[in-house]
Amino acid sequence: MFCFYGAFLLYYRRILASTISKAQQSCATGNPIDDCWKCDPNWGNNRQRLAECGIGFGQAAGGGKGGQIYVVTDSSDHDVANPTPGTLRHAVIQTEPLWIVFAANMQIKLKHELIVNSYKTIDGRGANVYITGSGCITLQYVSNVIVHNIHVYNCVPSGNTNIRSSPTHVGYRGKSDGDGITIFGSRNIWIDHCALSHCTDGLIDITMGSTAITISNNYFSHHNEVTIAFNHFGQGLIQRMPRCRHGYFHVVNNDFTEWRMYAIGGSASPTINSQGNRYMAPSDPSAKEVTKRVDTEEGDWAGWNWRTDGDVLENGAYFVPSGQGLSNQYTKAASVEAKSAAMIDQLTSTAGVLGGPRYIHTYIKLKKRA
């Protein structure tokens, strides 16, 4: 009897494992980030697995992995020099690794820029989290930060005040630009599944030698400066998706459905490797070109290494390549294996905040009705 029961139990476990495997396979989308964690029905019990799912140049970003879970329970931002425990500002300034989650849906209206310390994950999964107001999110001289599943919108300049950046430091900050997310002199950063729109300056601004960064699965709209896998660049965008200076840029498997001037711009001899993207040109016959060399004569940019590889160009869109096509240059600008552009609809179908509206004004209208 015992042998029969043991054999039955082993058989049952095999069937269960096969069922789970088939369920996970049916869940798979081909998007390697989402397939890494979303197919686990118990992902909420192992949130930090997300840190193992990064791709590209920023895949080493660990965020708050290994740290405590910090639950944000208070949406206020009353005192930027002495943040209230339970607020997002109090969480992000701590020195130890933290995995930050939210107790409920909330709109956080910042009084001034939110200065995030190293080894933090801001994880909005399971709640609709909207960050807006003055300054918005700043990552300055930090490393290992993950921002996931957050709406960022209507960010305006602010500053000329004292802001706490750690438990032991309060410093005077000049006026910020009004970017949605500012990445300044930082490394190992991953921005994933966020929705960004309507900010005074850039949606994501990456400057001052910041490196090892992945921007993935985001939905950008209603702006003209954004900075790159599985993203959807949509309504109201004008240019700089991204604009590149120096370095190596891998633009892979994105869906560009609108621009008014150009999609990809560059200056100072960057290497741009565009693979498996879909570029849908606007109806304006003067804005069909995907690329733009900014403030540079053709004799100067002719040697820059820019290539299109497996991209789909629609509605008259065209990409102007340049350079010698040196394979070693593009190897440096290859951060993840590109998939076929025929899969773009599938790969970008969940771009933006998971389970929430892609367009920020949807939330604003709902709030007004309430």
Image (spheres, rainbow, N blue to C red):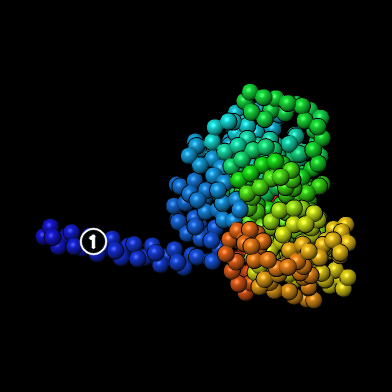
Q: Which residue is mark 1?
A: 10
Dot 1: what SS?
helix
- When the figure is inspected, residue 88 is found, relative to residue 18, above or below; the finding is above
Residue 103 appears in the picture as rendered:
no
Q: List x then y, in percent, for residue 7.
A: 18, 62
Residue 248 shows in this picture: yes
Disc 1 residue crowd, few under 14, some 14–19, many 20+, Cα 10 Å: few
Task: Give how far across and how far down residue 4 sits, in percent.
Answer: 14, 62
Callout 1, which amino acid? Leu
In depth, the one of 162 and 207 nearer the eye is 207
Residue at 76% from the left image edge and 39% from the top image edge:
135
In the image, 60 versus 268, the foreground residue is 268
Residue at horizontal 61 percent and vertical 40 percent from the top = 143
Identity of the residue drawn at 84% across and 61% down = 300
Query: Dividing the picture into quarters, in which one does residue 183 lie?
Result: top right
Q: Is residue 287 left or right of residue 186?
A: right
Where's residue 3, x and y in %?
13, 60
Q: Residue at x 78, y 49 (%)?
A: 202
The quadrant of the picture occupied by the N terminus is bottom left
Residue nearest the viewer, comparing 327 with 366: 327
212 lies above or below 296: above
Total labels: the figure holds: 1
Q: Residue furthest top?
A: 168
Nearer to the camera, 209 or 152: 209
What x and y, as percent, mark residue 336? 58, 61
Query: In the image, is residue 319 above or below residue 149?
Result: below
Tell whether 154 sits left or right of 299. Answer: left
- Image quarter for residue 132? top right
